[in-house]
Image (cartoon, rainbow, N blue to C red):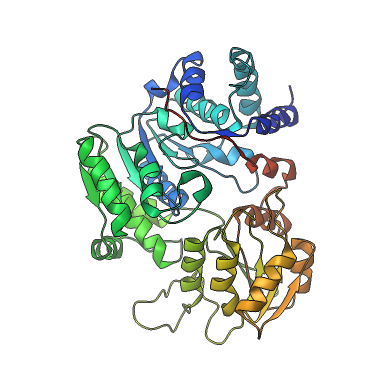
Amino acid sequence: MTYAEAVQFLYSLRLFGAKFGLENTFKLAALAGNPEKKLRFIHVAGTNGKGSTCAMLESIYRSAGLRVGLFTSPHLVSFRERIQVNRQLISENEVVRLVEELQPWLKQFPDGHHPTFFEVVTVMALKIFAEQKCDLVIWETGLGGRLDATNIVTPLASVITNIALDHQQWLGSTLAEIAAEKAGIIKPGVPVITATDEPESLAVIAEMARGKHAPLAEVAQASRLRAAAGTAALPLPGEHQRTNAALALATVKALHNNLPVNDAAIRSGLATVDWPGRLQLIEKPRGQKILLDGAHNVAGAKVLREALKRTPASGPAGQCNHSKCAGPGAGAPITLILGVLGDKDWQHICEILAPLAARIFTVPVASERAAGADDLAVACRTANSSAQIFACASLGAALDKSAGDAFVVITGSLYLVGEALEMLGLSPAAESERGLNEWSVAAQPASTGR
C-alpha cells in the first residue's frame, strides 16, 4: 500500500458518516490491544479555543521534558496534522502501516456498524501514541463530547473551554443542551477545568461535576487576566488567547501533583506555542498583510471582530500591542475574503464581519457543505451597503482581485484557511487530504455502549 492508497482508504470511510456512540470505538480499541490503557490524557472539549488550548498544553509539557502526543481535528492541509508526537507529524509510512493493521479488524464489524473515519483515526492515534511511549496525550474531542469517539479514555483532567451555539442540529438547540454534551467528558473523581462563564452553561457543567464528585475549577474573567498577565508574551494574538492561556495554566496547576512543571517550562511553553490559521498574520514581500483566521461560527466571528478593532501600536490601554497583533493599524481599510459552510449560521457571521470591511470578496469553500458565494454576497450587502462586494468563483480569483489591497482577512472556515495556506505557499499542497475533513451524520445519538 502506498500513502496515496492509505489516504484513499481513509477517504472511503466517509461513506459511513459520523455515528454518535462509543460501541465501535471501544471494540476497535480492544482489537488494537486497548492502547488507551497505557497512556495518560488531558481531554479537551468546548465550542471554540480547543485547538489553541491543546497547543498551549502540549507546548508547556513538552518544554517540561515530557514526550507529548497531540490529537486534534480538523486538519488544515495534511491529514498527518491530526496525530503528532512532540509536534512532529506522524510519518506517511506510519499512516500506511496503521491503515494496513486496522483493515482486518474492520471486517469483524457487522453490516450497518462499520467504524467511521473518525473512529478509525481515533484508534490509529491511540495506537501510535502507545507505540511511541508518550508520557502524556493532549486529546481533543471531535464533535460534542459525551458520545464522541475520544470519550473512551479516562483522563487526568477534563477541560471545557467554552460553550456557544454551534452544531445545533446534532448537539442541541440551547446552550444548556450543548453544555450537557460537552460535559459528557467529565469522569468520576477526575478534575474539571473550564473557562465557561455563561451562567446557563456553567450551571450544567457544575451539576455534572458534582454528580460525579469531580472537583471543578472555574477560570473566571478576573483570574484569567491576572494569570495570563504574569506569563511570557504569547505569540498567538488576541485577547481570547489570554483566556486560553489562563485555562491551560489552571489545568497545569490542577495536575501539578501528578505532572509537576516548573515556571520556566510554563514560560517557555507559552512563549513558543504555534497554532497556524488562528489570527495568523502573514506579510508578503511587497508589504501586503494577510490575516488567516478560522472563525467558523458566530462566537469565532465575534472574537475576530474584536481582534480587528485593535491596532498594533497605538491602541487604548489594555489593547494588544504585540507586534503580531491582528489589527490592521489606524486608518487601514480591511479587505475581507469570506467563505463559510452552509450548515453554519452564515447570515449572522456576515452581519458581524461585513461592517468591518471596505471591500468584500465572497468565495465558495472547497466542501460539499459550502454556502454559495452569491448568497454570502447578498447577506454582506445587507449588513454593509457601503462596501464594494464581489462574489468570486474561487479563493484564487479573490486573491488575484485583492492583490493590490494593503490588508486582507481570509476567514469563515478552517477549510478555507487550509486552502489559503496552500495557495500562499505556506504549506505543502495536499488537496486530496483536505477532503478527509468532510463528514455527515449517519445516525442520531443513541447510547454510549458502556
In the displayed structure, would residue 151 be above or below residue 103?
Answer: below
Q: Nearer the viewer, residue 248 or 10?
A: 10
Residue 158 relative to residue 257: left or right: right
Q: Quadrant of the C terminus?
A: top left
Q: Where does residue 5 sit, x and y in percent of width and height?
A: 74, 27
Q: How many marks?
A: 0
Q: Nearer the viewer, residue 24 or 245?
A: 24
In the displayed structure, would residue 316 be above or below residue 153?
Answer: below
User: Where, by quadrant of the figure, is residue 419 drawn?
Assistant: bottom right
Q: Quadrant of the N terminus?
A: top right
User: Where, by quadrant of the figure, is residue 45 drawn?
Assistant: top left
In the displayed structure, would residue 224 be above or below residue 216?
Answer: below
Q: Is residue 255 visible?
A: no
Q: Where does residue 86 sit, x and y in percent of width and height?
A: 47, 38
Residue 180 relative to residue 340: left or right: left
Kindly identify the residue that appears in the image at 28 percent across and 58 percent down.
199
Kindly identify the residue that appears in the image at 59 percent across and 70 percent down.
350
Residue 119 relative to residue 342: left or right: left
User: Where, by quadrant of the figure, is residue 347 drawn?
Assistant: bottom right
Kindly identify the residue that appears in the image at 52 percent across and 65 percent down.
301
Kindly identify the residue that appears in the image at 62 percent across and 81 percent down.
384
Q: Is residue 199 visible?
A: yes
Q: Where does residue 82 sit, x and y in percent of width and height?
A: 55, 39
Residue 383 relative to residue 321: left or right: right
Q: Where does residue 162 sit, x and y in percent of width and height?
A: 38, 54
